[in-house]
Image (spheres, helix red, strand yellow):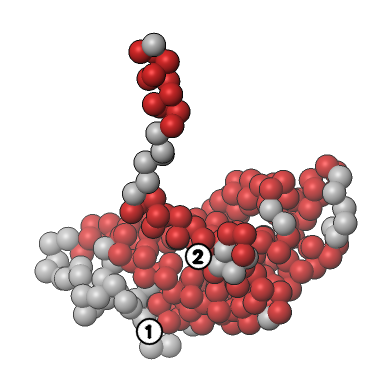
Amino acid sequence: MSVKFEKETVRESPLPTGRKHEIAHEIGERLTGGESQTGYLAAYLKQLQSNPLRTKMLTSGSLAAVQELLASWIAHDRSKHGHYFNSRVPKMAVYGAFISAPLGHVLISILQKLFAGRKSLKAKILQILVSNLIIAPIQNVVYLTSMALIAGARTFHQIRATVKAGFMPVMKVSWITSPLALAFAQKFLPEQTWVPFFNIVAFVIGTYINAHTKKKRLAALRKKHYGEGRSNSGRPEDYPKRDY
């Protein structure tokens, strides 16, 4: 009798609910919209369909600025005034909105049109190859050129040197992450959600690379200026101006 009583008690006991569970549920409803499809993600996807380029420009510009700010905070890379908000933040926002987003919009649109309605394994593999061998190199060359200009490069030789030095390392990262991200999107995500998904992936990877690069640069500067009585709190120009 005691065993039966305990089973019935457990079966009839309501599941514990608390404020934390309610908050988590509310956040999930707000993000995804739940059954009503009125959440932030649903609203974003609606804007992405009705105003694709404008939405991508706003998204890419905002993420690029936040990425630079977050990477500076992670690497403890302060401006000469001691702030993490440096001149690169608005420049990165301009790059994301007016260069990266339009270029990605055109290239991804072409890729999706080329493989529209093709769901075979061969088509998916070919799509990954085209993305990594044609689209990724174009995007990375434009990215490295823009980063060189933002860093202060003003001559063709400085820009070419930056692109030459950074192209293969960046391509190796793309060749590792892009096939995995694209294969995941092909398998689990509808095409209209590819843009926010790839934005999140690029944001995480870009923040890591940016922070890692800043840490290496700061370490090199500390080693170079050690014992010379110079302050390392400021951000020296990557390409100092010269009198030509």
Image vertical order of residue 7 relative to residue 162, above or below: above
Image vertical order of residue 186 relative to residue 37, above or below: above
Image vertical order of residue 80 relative to residue 140, above or below: below
**Residue highlighted by disc 1:** 242
Q: Is residue 187 left or right of residue 58?
A: right
Q: Residue at x 57, y 63 (%)?
A: 33
Image quarter where the N terminus lies is: top left
Image quarter where the C terminus lies is: bottom left
- State the SS at label 2: helix
- State the SS at label 1: loop
Residue 217 spot, x, y in % from top left: 34, 61
- In the image, what residue type sits under mark 1? Arg
Image vertical order of residue 185 relative to residue 242, above or below: above
**Residue highlighted by disc 2:** 30
Q: Residue at x 71, y 64 (%)?
A: 192
Q: Nearer the viewer, residue 103 or 203?
A: 203
Distance (Cα) linking label 2 and label 1? 53 Å
Q: Nearer the viewer, residue 82 or 31?
A: 31
Residue 120 spot, x, y in % from top left: 86, 45
Q: Is residue 186 left or right of residue 63?
A: right
